[in-house]
């Protein structure tokens, strides 16, 4: 019984993280001064992000700020592939990147 309760708790935590990620991504796509529900596409925008990028985005959300090397184990992909995906998300302005010494760190973008 305790195992079922623990599994349910983990599912609820993951759903909460997903809701926070969706809210942050939707903040990015919302035009200034407009209600999201009145914007064409609205909440479906996150669904338009390809699944491979969504997986990277969720991993980055869990980590907060990370390098491609740190994101790769969470997604089960290589560092090189994660670097490509993180740079795609950065070009889409969903995340930001900055240098700290020799490391290139990525984090969710702060917009609007």
Image (cartoon, grey):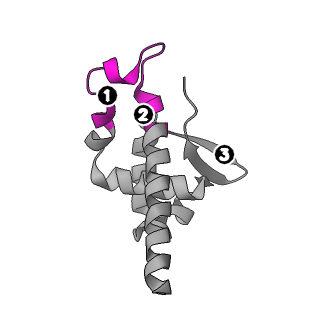
Residue drawn at x 26%, y 40% as measured from the top left = 48
The quarter of the image holding the C terminus is top right
Residue drawn at x 42%, y 55% as measured from the top left = 56
Residue drawn at x 26%, y 27% as measured from the top left = 41
Which contiguous range is marked in magenta?
A: 24-45
Query: In this image, 10 relative to 44: left or right?
Result: right
Q: Are marks 3 and 1 in contact (CB under 8 Å)?
A: no
Q: Residue furthest top?
A: 33
x and y percentages locating residue 18 in the rendered image: 44, 52
Magenta stretch contains residue 37: yes
Residue 78 circle label: none
Q: Which residue is label 3 attached to?
A: 99
Can residue 57 be seen in this snapshot?
A: yes
First along the sequence among labels 3 and 2: 2
First along the sequence among labels 3 and 1: 1
x and y percentages locating residue 28 in the rendered image: 46, 30
Q: Which residue is label 1 attached to?
A: 42
Q: Residue furthest right?
A: 101
Q: Mark 3, residues whose alpha carbon is within 10 Å: few (<14), some, or many (≥20)?
A: few
Query: In this image, 98 relative to 23: left or right?
Result: right
Q: Nearer the viewer, residue 27 or 50?
A: 27
Q: Nearer the viewer, residue 84 or 5?
A: 5
- Whole-angstrom CA distance, mark 3 to mark 1, is 33 Å
Q: Are marks 1 and 2 in contact (CB under 8 Å)?
A: yes
In this view, the mark in front (3 or 2): 2
Q: Mark 1, residues whose alpha carbon is within 10 Å: few (<14), some, or many (≥20)?
A: some
Q: Which residue is label 2 attached to?
A: 26
């Amino acid at each position: 019984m305790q195992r079922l309760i623990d599994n349910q708790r983990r599912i609820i935590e993951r759903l909460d993280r997903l809701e926070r990620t969706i809210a942050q991504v939707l903040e990015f796509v919302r035009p200034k001064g407009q209600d999201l529900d009145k914007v064409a596409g609205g909440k479906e925008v996150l669904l338009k992000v390809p699944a491979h990028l969504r997986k990277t985005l969720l991993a980055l959300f869990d980590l907060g700020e990370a390098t491609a090397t740190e994101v790769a184990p969470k997604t089960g992909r290589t560092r090189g592939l994660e670097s490509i995906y993180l740079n795609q998300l950065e070009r889409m302005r969903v995340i930001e990147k900055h240098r700290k010494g020799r490391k290139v760190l990525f984090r969710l973008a702060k917009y609007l």
